[in-house]
Image: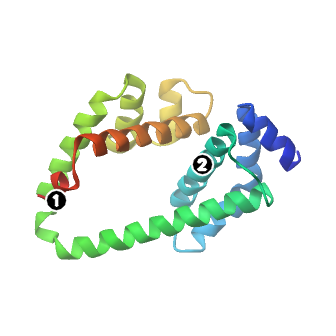
Amino acid sequence: MKDSEVLARITKGDESALDFLYKKYYRMMTKLVITNSGTEDEARDIYQDALVVFWEKARKGNLVLTSKISTFIYSICLNLWRKELERKSRLSSEVKDDVEFIDIEKKERIQIIRACINELGETCKRILMYYYFDGLSMSDIAEKLGYANTDTAKTKKYKCKKRLDELVKAKYTESDFMD
């Protein structure tokens, strides 16, 4: 399938075109993360997040490709991985500074997150609880919720997580997490 055909099909909402991209570029995209201090799981998550970004841009109609799809997705993966590495670096330095406060802060954060999750719809609540609190894999979640495949569950988790982030930001300030 040519890039123009893939893009046209995704623009129309054809998830099989997304599956095609997922399989076609999986090794290339995950290798990027793995060769840059990432794990296989992190690589898979970054790649899935990149595909969601690509999907959303294409569906909104504001995607103008000036390169091959693989190059575009690669750059998204690269940027997402850089942000993740920066986040990890910040977290590790914060941990060194605040070791004695971690347990209390973690419990409070979990309570805030749980309260916000309870305000989401039942599907989002179940997906996020299964993933973050029960530690279920995306394939287990897809099976439990009756989704056609793992990619569908991942896309739903991404959208639910995004809504959760927006809800937390709307209800709480940064100082709620700092005090």
Name the residue beneath numbered marker 2: 53
Q: Quadrant of residue 129?
A: top left
- The crowd level at tag 1 (other Cα within 10 Å; few <14, some 14-19, many 20+) is few
Q: Quadrant of residue 166?
A: top left
Q: Please name the residue shown 26% across and 42% down the image.
A: 113
**From the viewer's perspective, is residue 95 above or below residue 166?**
below
Tell me whether circle 1 and circle 2 mark residues in contact (CB < 8 Å).
no
Relative image position of residue 79 (x, y in whole percent): 56, 65
Q: Residue 39: tell me if it is visible.
A: no
Q: CA distance from mark 1 to mark 2?
A: 30 Å
Q: Please name the residue shown 65% across and 38% down the image.
A: 60
Numbered disc total: 2
Mark 2 residue element: helix
**From the viewer's perspective, is residue 19 above or below residue 38?**
above
Q: Earlier in the sequence, mark 1 or mark 2?
A: 2
Quarter placement of the N terminus: top right
Mark 1 residue element: helix
- The crowd level at tag 2 (other Cα within 10 Å; few <14, some 14-19, many 20+) is some
Name the residue beneath numbered marker 1: 178
Q: Please name the residue shown 53% across and 29% down the image.
A: 143
Relative image position of residue 179 (x, y in whole percent): 11, 58
In the rendered structure, the answer to whether residue 176 lies left or right of residue 8 reads left
Q: Quadrant of residue 27?
A: bottom right
Relative image position of residue 64 (x, y in whole percent): 75, 51
Tag 2: amino acid: Val
